[in-house]
Image (spheres, rainbow, N blue to C red):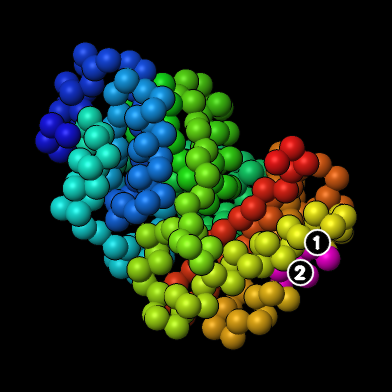
Amino acid sequence: VTGVLRTRAELRDALAAVPRPLGLVPTMGWLHDGHRSLMQRARADDATTIVTIFVNPRQFNEAADYQRYPRNETRDLAVVEEEGIDLVFAPPVEEIYLPGFDTTVSVGAVARPLEGAARPGHFDGVATVVAILFDLVGAERAYFGQKDAQQVMVIRQMARDLAIPTEVIACPTVREPDGLALSSRNVHLQAEERAAAPVLRRALLAATARWEAGERSGDRLREAMRETLAEEPLARLDYVSVAGGTTRAELDRVEGPALLSLAVRFGDTRLIDNEVLSDGS
Ligand code: PAF
């Protein structure tokens, strides 16, 4: 890393003559092994790599959630350095949202259910900031975690519709040994909540096992997730979903590829996870 880029002008100058292809890893900081896996993939694919660190106020549907989102730039820069990333762009809010900023990128059907329904405005915030970052950076490829499966679909739709040529690459979810998907939010879990949190993964695996045994009823697969979650008293269910098709509608019958997903609260902390059902895997 050659020093942290803070402004659009610094970013433009730094990118002017870098070797291509350029790989972008957009993050909100508090970097963990999931982010490291994205950086490693970018380094394998691309001649130059850039990480952005920007806690995007527009994608938090609750102000308190934005305030308490974990931040530690010193630690993040050490991670980026260890991973051999070439450039870091960590702008202040005013550098992304210029004074008088008044545009929202709002993706349609794919952004409406699940996280879109549970967190109004969230995907508008994500699509808006990622469109800006894609434009500013102009990378050939950008890397995102499959843990946020719907986010990946929203970003793909946005890039396609706005004719942004950056290719969107989804990388596998990285997990703790007990199955908990890595997330910056895990830091908020109390000890007993942390111990209970692998129930998300167990619920997904229970439904996957039923599907592998031939179960094709969406209701029964959703029920399998609910039953497993009910075993854990600290887990408060937000939603379980078996969705498919381009609009991610809830499925009555699982005939083709489908996405199992769920959102669960432990105290004030909301966790999500998912699993793809696909005959090819
Ligand atoms: O996944 C994230 O960390 C954020 O949603 C992203 C893609 C960096 C946009 O702020």
Magenta highlight range: 220-226
Q: Circles 2 and 1: CB distance less than 8 Å? A: yes
Q: Quadrant of residue 204?
A: bottom right
Residue depicted at x 57% and y 54% = 116
- Horizontally, residue 117 falls left or right of residue 224, namely left
Q: Which residue is mark 1?
A: 210
Q: Which residue is mark 2?
A: 224
Residue depicted at x 29% and y 63% = 70
Check the picture and name the quadrant holding the C terminus.
top right
Majority secondary structure in the magenta region: helix
Extreme residue toward the front, this view: 177
Extreme residue toward the left, this view: 3
Cβ of disc 1 within 8 Å of ligand 1? no
- Horizontally, residue 126 falls left or right of residue 100, namely right
The answer to whether residue 252 is visible is no
Vertical arrangement, residue 188 with respect to residue 122, above or below:
below
Tell me if residue 221 is in the magenta stretch: yes
Indicate which disc, 2 or 1, sits on the residue closer to the N terminus: 1
Vertical arrangement, residue 260 with respect to residue 158, above or below:
below
User: What SS does tag 2 mark?
Assistant: helix
Residue depicted at x 15% and y 38% = 4
Check the picture and name the quadrant holding the N terminus.
top left
Residue depicted at x 52% and y 38% = 170
User: Could you tell me residue 93's position as x and y percent?
Assistant: 24, 47
- Circle 2 or circle 1, nearest the eye: 1
Extreme residue toward the bottom, this view: 233
Report the amino acid beneath label 1. Arg
User: Could you tell me residue 158's position as x and y percent?
Assistant: 53, 33
User: What SS does tag 1 mark?
Assistant: helix
Alpha carbon distance from label 2 to label 1:
8 Å
